[in-house]
């Protein structure tokens, strides 16, 4: 499975990130063409090879007025075959509107021009789509302070965006902010914590350079892919942490919410089992499987979201089938993520629940219909649909 990892030093703005994505192979002419079709005004993307694998990018267009959320979302309604791009740009626009703390309908985001704009966010989404990535892994970010009326203060917009993400951030007292609202929204919408890379090979890499000279920065993107020469028995072995707790005074709704929070925070699995405790009391055992680096965070969620006052934790070996992921396109243009597992030369295809559910909500189709079509297309049985 190919994965994109991003790390930055110094200034990280939208054009620096775009330079990195163009360096990895996203075609500027194709992005430019798609932007002009969507927005109906001229857009030019200028890319410069600074040195080696370092690139800078600039989006050149006439400055446009600020727009509200309702108008921003109209640009992404009903674009056939563009569901992934539409949802990501809408997600970033909503983040920026919420971070601006402005009333609904108030113009808050530039349509086009220097800095964060709807056009720059769309360019990043187009580049990710062309490279075949619906998410990326982000190493720890560095963020400083900005100049405000009271001296050096953190940007309220950036802080509001970061607090809703799961990205690791190292805050410092340096004078300059590294992130912009646009780059923060992009990383929050696409990014997941990098964690451990495991045994992967570098397939490609490139760096994007910020145009802002007084506070320069560099963003590195690395495409990693699982090594193909790892022995099969080694690929299928894994060590995990197991967390368990028994609760007899916790409602099913509360446990369901806790499981949802645990999975979103990075648990590999979370389950509940009915049990009997002492004195014949009916109860549930909550069991969570996770990686070592996630253990403390998930323990805190268990204590915060359930009535547990203690838990058991131990390390276990597990055997897992080698797996990879890919996206397939349904006949109506929607995309579904597929998990591919391999065993003894056979491949098994499992459509991912979240993407199947999203298609069902957008189209009104039954879950089984979407699931079966996605599985058949992934397995090469399109004639049987």
Image: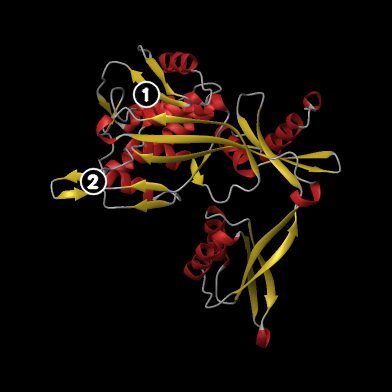
Q: Is residue 35 visible?
A: yes
Q: Residue at x 47, y 46 (%)?
A: 139
Q: Residue at x 69, y 75 (%)?
A: 275
Question: Separation of disc 1 and disc 2 at Cα?
Answer: 29 Å
Q: Position of residue 219 (x, y in %)?
A: 42, 35
Q: Position of residue 223 (x, y in %)?
A: 57, 34
Q: Is residue 179 depicted above or below 252 in this figure?
A: above
Mark 1–mark 2 contact, CB under 8 Å? no
Q: Is residue 323 depicted above or below 263 in this figure?
A: above
Q: Is residue 259 depicted above or below 330 in this figure?
A: below
SS under mark 1: helix
Q: Residue at x 51, y 45 (%)?
A: 192
Pointer 2 residue: 175
151 on left or right of 350: left
Q: Choose mark 1 or mark 2, whichever is in front.
A: 2
Q: Position of residue 292 (x, y in %)?
A: 59, 62
SS under mark 2: loop
Pointer 1 residue: 119
How dense is the environment of label 1, judged by Cα within 10 Å: few (below 14), some, or many (20 and up)? many
Q: Earlier in the sequence, mark 1 or mark 2?
A: 1
């Amino acid at each position: 499975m190919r994965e994109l990892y991003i790390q930055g030093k110094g200034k990280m703005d939208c054009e620096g990130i775009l330079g990195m994505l163009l360096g990895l192979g996203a075609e500027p002419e194709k992005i430019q063409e798609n932007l002009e079709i969507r927005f109906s005004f001229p857009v030019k993307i200028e890319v410069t090879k600074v040195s080696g694998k370092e690139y800078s990018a600039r989006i050149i267009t006439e400055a446009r007025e600020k727009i509200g959320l309702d108008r921003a979302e109209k640009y992404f309604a009903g674009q056939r075959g563009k569901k992934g791009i539409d949802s990501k740009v809408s997600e970033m626009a909503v983040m920026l509107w919420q971070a601006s703390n402005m009333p609904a309908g108030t113009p808050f985001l530039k349509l086009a021009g220097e800095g964060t704009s709807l056009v720059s966010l769309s360019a990043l989404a187009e580049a990710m789509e062309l490279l075949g990535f619906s998410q990326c892994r982000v190493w720890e970010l560095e963020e400083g302070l900005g100049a405000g009326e009271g001296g050096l203060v953190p940007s309220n917009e950036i802080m509001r965006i970061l607090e809703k993400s799961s990205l690791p951030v190292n805050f410092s007292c340096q004078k300059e902010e590294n992130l912009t609202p646009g780059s923060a929204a992009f990383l929050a919408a696409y990014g997941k914590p990098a964690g451990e890379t495991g045994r992967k090979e570098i397939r490609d890499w490139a760096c994007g350079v910020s145009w802002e000279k007084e506070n320069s920065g560099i963003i590195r993107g690395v495409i990693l892919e699982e090594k193909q020469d790892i022995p099969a028995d080694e690929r299928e072995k894994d060590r995990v942490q197991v967390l368990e707790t028994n609760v007899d005074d916790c409602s099913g709704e509360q446990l369901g919410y806790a499981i949802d929070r645990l999975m979103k925070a990075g648990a590999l699995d979370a389950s509940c089992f009915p049990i009997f405790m002492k004195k014949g009391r009916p109860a549930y055992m909550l069991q969570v499987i996770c990686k070592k680096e996630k253990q403390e965070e998930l323990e805190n969620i268990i204590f915060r979201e359930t009535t547990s006052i203690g838990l058991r934790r131990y390390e276990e070996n597990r055997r897992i089938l080698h797996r990879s992921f890919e996206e397939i396109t349904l006949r109506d243009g929607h995309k579904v993520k597929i998990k591919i597992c391999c065993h003894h030369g056979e491949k098994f295809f499992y459509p991912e629940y979240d993407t199947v559910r999203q298609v069902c909500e957008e189209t009104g189709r039954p879950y089984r219909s979407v699931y079966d079509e996605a599985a058949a297309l992934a397995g090469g049985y399109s004639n049987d649909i």
